[in-house]
Image (cartoon, rainbow, N blue to C red):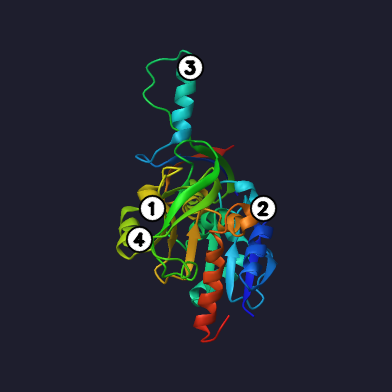
Amino acid sequence: MIRVAVVRFPGSNCDADTLRAVEQAGAEAYYVWHREAELGGADAVVLPGGFAYGDYLRAGAIARFSPVMAAVRSHAEQGGAVLGICNGFQILCEAGLLPGALMRNAGLKFVSRPVRVRVETTETPFTTAYEAGAILSLPVAHGEGRYVAPADDLSALEAEGRVVLRYLDNPNGSVNDIAGITNAARNVVGIMPHPERAADPVLGSPEGAKVFFSLVQSVALSRGGVP
Amino acid sequence: MPRYEVEVRVMPRAGLLDPQGQAVEHALRALGFEQIGGVRVGRALTLHLERPDAARAEADARAMCERLLANPVTEDFTLIVRGIP
């Protein structure tokens, strides 16, 4: 069975939803406390949403020094799949595993509502099960989701098809309506919307579930087997 | 070892939208303050360092800003170093 680590920081609050969504996709999901130095043989890692370390200094700025982040970095460098959702995305940017940064929403408000996003690439471990161009409705819940990046990083993201999700109705002022990106190797993905909060019809929408199905499918394919 | 106080000022980079600054500006106008040319909101930190000299205190504070205290993508910082008698 595919093993997926869900990292818990002090202040994570989407960890249980994420664990459940990964399990429903058919993988074995387990928590890893941020003080751990190992990921327990994980095939993939998810950094869930929340407010790690109370967003002190800047969202994600302190979490990147947690011991587990060295293991996440080495997992990523070996090509392992890493997904950061919301605060997890902020942590990946602060850790330098993804380019750019997430700033305070242009409208100043904390935005908590479903937004429409387009799947811009299916060439990441977390989007293979979608159709390219698919329009999804996924919840966002953030005060600091305005993506910015230096001009050269931004043109590389666009030229290399590394924008993963794009807002149709930009809720936070992100440059180029960017809602999610991937790294050059395409194994590390950060997204602001919460697919785990839309991963079951009982939650109002199942449209996010394919993020986790994609993961299970991709890991299985990379092992040359079936999930 | 001489002691230094380093005042670190971290500001959103010029040209990047600062919605906090805009909100504060609106609030000031609501109070009747006029002819405000702009407000930007940043962060101030005070560091107490023991270093052989002021240059060393500044160099270390700069390294701290580059690695943690300021985000190199979105923020700029300035330092003021004062000797503590």
Label 4 is found on which chain of the structure? Answer: A
Residue B46: horizontal and vertical position, in percent? 57, 40
Report in which chain the residue with disc 3 lies. B
> N-terminal of the two: label 1 or label 4?
1
Residue found farthest to the front: A201
For mark 2, what is the residue? Answer: A13
Task: Give the amino acid type for the residue marked by disc 1 in the picture.
Answer: Ala
Question: Which label is found at residue B40?
Answer: none
Residue hosting label 1: A149
Is A107 or A35 nearer to us in this picture?
Answer: A107
Q: Splitting the image into 4 quarters, where does residue A99 fall?
A: bottom left
Residue A206: % across, % down: 57, 59
Asked if labels 4 and 2 touch by Cβ distance under 8 angstroms, the answer is no
Q: CA distance from mark 3 to mark 1?
A: 34 Å
Image quadrant containing the C terminus of chain A: bottom right
Q: Sort mark 3 into few (<14), some (14-19) or many (20+) by Cα contacts within 10 Å.
A: few
Residue type indicated by callout 3: Ala
The secondary element bearing badge 2 is classed as: loop
Q: Which mark is residue B30?
A: 3
Q: Are marks 2 and 3 on the same chain?
A: no
